[in-house]
Amino acid sequence: MNVNPLNVMHSLKGILTEEEELTFMNILFSSSASIRSGNFGLSRKEVEKQLIIQGDEEKFHSFLTRVNQALSRYMRVIYDERRDQVIAMMRVPARAARNTLTKESLAILLYMFYQQEVLQQEFTLFDQLLDAFGHETTKANQRILINLDLLKKIGAIEDYDTNSQEKAYQLTAIGVHMFSDSFLRRMTEFSQSNQLNKEEVLKFFKRYNLYQKGENE
């Protein structure tokens, strides 16, 4: 991890070509919730068009890798395969994150993360959330829906079509990448009541398949 990413930002021209630098700025701009609410980032087709590398898998991933190597301390560019979108995510301190998500919405997101990333379930039903979080609260339906709407607004989850009247939700790539390894380690240690090393935590959350081979988080 680069420990001086702000200095690197001043010398991005030494890492990125002019087209890559412009594309990166466009990804940053389009990843703002206030600009592209519900449709964060740029499509891969648009990124490849701006980079003039249509269909070149190696150059596409090389661009993502070099940006992330330079700026990984403060941000990360991810590729959401399901949506076919390239998104820039900012790294923020826990205190700042608490101003974006309520404790309830964070708990719901972590519950969905465990279901879908650990248990490998394709989606989470609203009734499951109600059963997990609503049995001890008043107006549970309304409160859960408010928190789900908050998660939708930041692009962490989206509605899932079950071909029935049941409400269901699915994590997006943004939601999957919102939790750092250190946060997952603390959560797992708390639930297990003992300290765990990084490999045990990653194995528990089955996160190996989220990274390119040889990539370090």
Image (cartoon, rainbow, N blue to C red):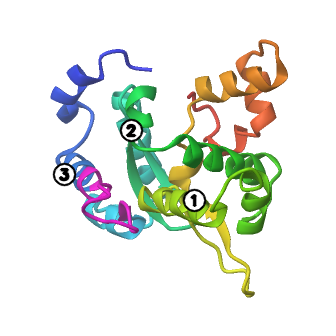
The residue under the point 56% across, 31% down is 180
Question: Relative to 68, does residue 169 appear above or below in the rendering?
Answer: below
**Residue type indicated by callout 1:** Arg
Could you tell me residue 190's position as x and y percent?
75, 21
Task: Report x, y in % for residue 204.
Answer: 80, 33
Q: Nearer the viewer, residue 118 or 87?
A: 118
The residue beneath circle 1 is 143
Contact, CB < 8 Å: mark 2 with mark 3?
no
- What residue did someone put label 3 on? 22
Q: Residues within 10 Å of mark 1 (few under 14, many from 20)?
A: some
Between marks 2 and 3 in the image, the one whose residue lies nearer the viewer: 2
- Residue 52 position, x and y percent, is 28, 62
Nearer to us in this view, 32 or 73: 32
The residue that mark 2 highlights is 99
Seen as rendered, the residue at the extreme front is 138
- Left/right placement of residue 177 relative to residue 42 reads right
The CA span between labels 1 and 2 is 18 Å
